[in-house]
Amino acid sequence: MVEEVLATKIHVVIPVIVGIIIAILETYFITHDEGTASMSQVMGDITHSAITCVLGTLIACNVPWLLTQSFIPAFVNKWLFVNAIGESIVVSIIVTLIVKIKMVVHHKVIRGIQGQNEKFIHMILVAALVGFSPYYIFLLYNIPAFVTFAAKIPWLPL
């Protein structure tokens, strides 16, 4: 039952919530590691990380739905190794790499920060949380209390 729902519907609410939580964590790491002082710089970091984390989480969590769209060629399906519940290790790794590259480019090239940069382990942690979000969101869907709660809310996919 849960596997069929996860593989066939588009997921928006839970991935957006998870993406926002990850964005808050990334913003904390940025302000802690770089010593950001101005509020405008913090708000820019929040906006930049929220867009990246939410989009990455949405892409990683909706692989089966993305594959049904007409802009993705059919031969790509066999390369992505999508399992029965819609998780793809290839897409997770690609999203993780893209988020990691985004963080490096944003912090080192665009802002021109020298010396005090976001720590490597923090960037890897945030990128892995975004890219591999379908795996722990699936665990959330298997908690009986969450399934009971989600059945009462019409916009959650259960």
Image (cartoon, rainbow, N blue to C red):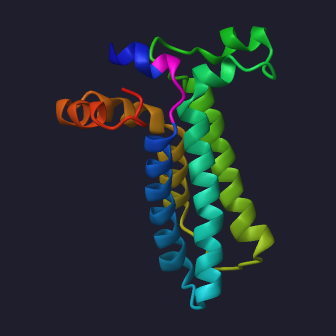
First to last magenta residue range: 7-11
Q: Identify the image quadrant of residue 136.
A: top left
Is residue 67 depicted above or below 53 in this figure? above
For this rendering, which residue is in front, 145 or 78? 145
Q: Which residue is drawn at 55% across and 49% down?
A: 127
**Quadrant location of the N terminus?**
top left
Foreground: 15 or 115? 15
- Residue 89: percent from the left, percent from the top? 55, 25
As rendered, which of 114 and 93 lies closer to the eye?
93
Q: Can residue 116 be seen in this view?
A: no
- Residue at 55% from the left image edge and 23% from the top image edge: 88
Dominant SS type (magenta): loop
Look at 63% across and 67% down and name the residue there: 47
- Where is 52 relative to 143, above or below? below
Whether residue 152 sits left or right of residue 125 in the image: it is left
Question: Eyeballing the image, is 120 above or below 91?
Answer: below
Name the spot of residue 141 as percent of width and height, x first: 31, 30
**Could you tell me how many numbered marks the image carries?**
0
Q: Where is residue 13 in the image (x, y as percent from the top left)?
A: 46, 43
Quadrant for the C terminus, please: top left
Answer yes or no: is residue 37 visible.
Answer: yes
Residue furthest to the bottom? 38
Left or right, 141 with reference to 111: left
| Picture coordinates of residue 135, whole percent (x, y) | 41, 31
Question: Depth check: 102 or 41 in front?
Answer: 41
Kindly identify the residue that appears in the image at 45 percent across and 63 percent down.
Answer: 25
Whether residue 140 appears in magenta in the rendering, the answer is no
Q: Is residue 50 left or right of residue 122?
A: right
